[in-house]
Image: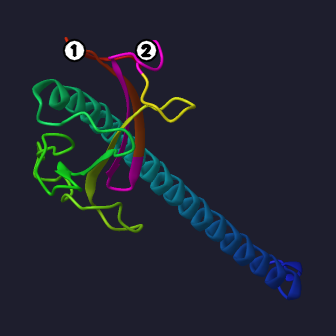
C-alpha cells in the first residue's frame, strides 16, 4: 500500500526538481562539450599557424642564401648607390628578368600557389619580396667596412616571405669585396 503522505503536491515538487536537475546537468555538459571543441579548434589553428611560420622562416633564410649565391655567381648585380634592387618571386622589378632569388618550387603538391603579395585572411598563397640596397653613410656615400673610399661594399638584404597566413621578415648585412661575398649577420 502506498503512504497517503507520498502523494500530492510534495511528490510533484520533487519530480519537478528532478527534471530541473536533469536539464541543468544536460546544459552544463553541452557547455563543457562546446568549450572543449572550441579549445581544440583554437589549439589546432595555433599549431597550424606555428607550422606556417616555421615554413616561412625557413623560406626567408633560404632566400637570403639564394641572394648571396646569386651575387657570387653574377646572376644578381650589386646595386648602384640609391638604386636598390627589388625582386618579387624571383623577378627583378626594374628589368622584368628572372633571377634565382626567392623562387622556390613547391616540394609537395599541397603547398599554396605563388602570389605576388600577401593575401587577405582566409586566402592561401606564398611568395617572397627581396630588397638589396647599398649601405649608405651619413654623407650619402656608399660604405664599406672602413668607411668612405673603401673599395668593399656593404649591402643590406631585406626579405619578406608569406606562406598561407604567416608572414616573416629577415635581414642580412653582406660584405662584397673584390674576392668574396660573405654574410656578416
Q: Which residues are magenta?
A: 144-167
Query: Which quadrant: the C terminus?
Result: top left
Count the marks: how many? Answer: 2
In reply to whether residue 50 is colored magenta, the answer given is no
Judge whether 77 appears above or below 179 on screen: below
Residue at numbered disc 1: 178
Residue at numbered disc 2: 145
Is residue 148 left or right of 71 when viewed as pictured?
A: right
Compare residues 180 and 100 and report the one nearer the observer. 180
Q: Position of residue 55 (x, y in %)?
A: 30, 39
Q: Position of residue 6 (x, y in %)?
A: 83, 78
Residue at left offset 37%, top offset 38%: 81
Compare residues 20 and 121 and report the one nearer the observer. 121
Report how far apart the C-alphas of labels 2 and 1 lie in the structure: 13 Å
Query: Which quadrant: the N terminus?
Result: bottom right
Residue 16 visible to an observer of this rendering: yes
Amino acid at each position: 500500500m502506498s503512504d497517503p503522505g507520498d502523494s500530492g503536491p510534495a511528490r510533484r515538487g520533487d519530480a519537478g526538481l528532478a527534471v530541473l536537475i536533469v536539464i541543468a546537468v544536460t546544459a552544463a555538459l553541452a557547455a563543457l562539450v562546446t568549450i572543449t571543441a572550441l579549445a581544440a579548434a583554437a589549439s589546432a589553428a595555433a599549431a597550424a599557424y606555428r607550422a606556417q611560420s616555421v615554413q616561412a622562416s625557413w623560406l626567408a633564410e633560404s632566400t637570403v642564401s639564394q641572394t648571396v649565391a646569386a651575387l657570387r655567381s653574377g646572376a644578381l648585380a650589386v646595386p648602384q648607390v640609391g638604386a636598390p634592387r627589388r625582386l618579387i618571386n624571383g623577378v627583378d622589378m626594374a628589368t622584368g628578368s628572372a633571377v634565382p632569388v626567392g623562387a622556390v618550387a613547391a616540394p609537395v603538391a599541397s603547398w599554396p600557389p605563388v602570389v605576388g603579395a600577401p593575401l587577405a585572411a582566409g586566402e592561401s598563397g606564398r611568395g617572397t619580396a627581396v630588397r638589396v640596397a647599398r649601405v649608405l653613410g651619413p654623407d650619402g656615400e656608399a660604405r664599406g667596412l672602413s668607411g668612405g673610399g673603401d673599395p668593399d661594399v656593404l649591402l643590406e638584404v631585406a626579405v619578406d616571405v608569406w606562406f598561407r597566413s604567416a608572414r616573416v621578415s629577415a635581414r642580412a648585412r653582406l660584405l662584397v669585396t673584390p674576392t668574396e661575398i660573405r654574410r656578416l649577420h
